[in-house]
Image (cartoon, rainbow, N blue to C red):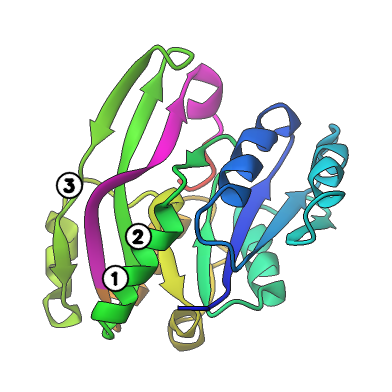
Amino acid sequence: MNTKVSIIIPTYNRANLLAKAIKSVLNQTYKDLELIIVDDGSEDNTREVVKHFQVNDLRVQYIYQENRGLSSALNKGLSIASGEYIAFLESDDEWLPRKLEKQLKVFTKHLSVGLVTCWSFRIFENGNKKKLFKTHKGIIKKENWCNFFKTKGIISPNTIILRREVFDSVGNFDTKLKAAVDLDFYIRLIKNFDIYFLPIPLVNYYESQESLSKKIFG
């Protein structure tokens, strides 16, 4: 497979955490990618943090917009993305190195799948405590879309990768919503595409008092 993946990181005043997320994307074993960082009006040194990576890696793009909220930032990234697959990452979390490689293989085996998700590690207390977070295993067919709501927990946007055609079919993120942006999107998606749950942890999701107060996908 030689197919570009577009990764979108929306961020707002997270310059002190952003580098970790960027490194985890650039260190992926799957290299045919572009990283689009959408700065939603940050007032810190986010721009300088991104420039540090742009000097050595042409795959990194930086887009600044006035503060308009999560959905607007995600849709801005989508409008620029050129990949056949789309993935998202929050600016204080990180991927394990083989995330894209393992998830892309699912698409080649299951042509009806529009979204692939995976398990994750929840990391607490400054990295001193780690817990495996499991969700469903295997495929949920669109004909059985009600079963999506029986899965263990809401899918974290950090864990997903999608075919670009999904957005062409079901639309982008709803800018009118202030919360549950991801759930609204999943409800539209599951009625049109199958979802595959890869039972492997491929994401580190950091939880702290700071992160719990700012998680952008409500």
Spatial CA span between label 1 and label 3: 21 Å
Residue 55: give its label: none
Q: Residue at x 72, y 74 (%)?
A: 80
Q: Is residue 124 above or below residue 133?
A: above
- Identify the secondary structure beneath mark 2: helix
Q: Amino acid at mark 3?
A: Lys
Q: Which residue is mark 1?
A: 106
Residue 102: give its label: 2
Q: Is residue 168 above or below residue 61?
A: below
Q: Position of residue 59 (x, y in %)?
A: 73, 61
Snapshot quadrant of residue 150: bottom left
In terms of secondary structure, what is the magenta stretch mainly?
strand
Q: Which residue is mark 3?
A: 152
Give neighbour class at mark 3: few <14, some 14-19, many 20+ (Cα, 10 Å): few
- Identify the secondary structure beneath mark 1: helix
Tell me, yes or no, whether the two marked residues, 1 and 2, touch with CB atoms within 8 Å.
yes
Q: Is residue 151 above or below residue 186?
A: above
- Does 190 appear in magenta? no
Q: Amino acid at mark 2?
A: Lys
- Between disc 1 and disc 3, the foreground one is 1
Quick check: can you spot residue 187?
no
